[in-house]
Image: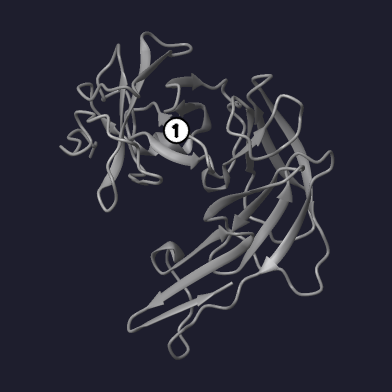
Amino acid sequence: MYLLSPPAHGHPDDREERPPFVLIEPYAYFADDRDNATTAFCPMNGFKGQFKVTFCTARPPLVSYMCFQATAYDHTPFAVEPQILATETDGSRVLLRVVFGNHPSAITFPHNRHYLVYDASGPSIEHLPHPGAGVRFSGDSLAFVRKCTHGTIHDCTGNCAYVLAAHSGGFGDARPYQLYLYHSDTKIWQQKEMVLKPSPYPVPYHSTRKAITVGGDKGTVAWVDLWHNIILCDVLADCPELRSLQLPPPILLGNELPRGNPRSVRDIALLDGLFEYVQIQPGSCALGH
């Protein structure tokens, strides 16, 4: 099923002052009738026509959403809806993945996946160079890291370059892992090896469910397994190392084991320099940092 009918709210653009934050749908709608001041176009590299993206803003508790169109096609050449994989902390950039194919299973093949960086403040879109048909990275691990023109990471709000960072898969032993970086200033994908630093306690197998940009001069990214731990990585270091930080164990009833998608009951965010987490359970709520 494709998302073809966007909500009525958020369009037409009423040009009110933008809210300080929004809730946003993780998937974009296929729609060509939602133009506003945020609408942007870019060439489809290797294809006919242009990509078109519009951001439709709504004040919470309403949910904002994005509309997507390939101007030379309808929705049928795409295997699934465009998905938001990452958003920029304190910025306006969004990373979208679009997948070409005639069946949802086409998403499993890297050569079908294409990546767009959309900036609502410009507005602008960039169709990124393809990372390579043999490159496989975790979509949940993608994160924006901001880099100024002088090569320093900071909290500027100007036209800084950015880096996209992602890793190759789950962590669980001392073998080398792959770090993939896209540099907006050179428009080149880069690959580096990472090694998990020795830990005084056993490191469980890690499956990233979300990525958090910590920032700093070395561009620290936190990859979070909501059941087990946080893996920290300075993605702009010459020789990136992985450091593990354990999370409190899940609050369980009886002898039950954690299973399923933890994002339905557990989440974590970086607030004022601290990782704050929340877990919900029928009849209870647990908070910590």
Residue density around tag 1, few if under 14, some if 14–19, many if 20 or more, within 10 Å? many
Question: Quadrant of the rendered structure where residue 19 is?
Answer: top left
**Which residue is nearer to you in this view: 95 or 216?**
216
Q: Amino acid at mark 1?
A: Arg
What percent of the width, then of the height, locates residue 184?
63, 24
Q: How many numbered dots are placed on residues in this image?
A: 1
Q: 147 above or below 202?
A: above
What percent of the width, then of the height, locates residue 67?
29, 30
Residue shown at 62% from the left, 33% from the top: 135
Residue shown at 78% from the left, 42% from the top: 193
What percent of the width, then of the height, locates residue 90?
53, 42
Question: Relative to residue 217, is residue 131 drawn left or right?
Answer: left
Question: Quadrant of the rendered structure where residue 76 is?
Answer: top left
Residue shown at 37% from the left, 12% from the top: 50
Residue receiving disc 1: 97
Q: Quadrant of the N terminus?
A: top left
Question: Relative to residue 105, is residue 45 drawn left or right?
Answer: right
Q: Secondary structure at mark 1?
A: strand
Q: 222 above or below 145?
A: below
Q: Quadrant of the C terminus?
A: bottom right
**Which residue is nearer to you in this view: 61 or 185?**
61
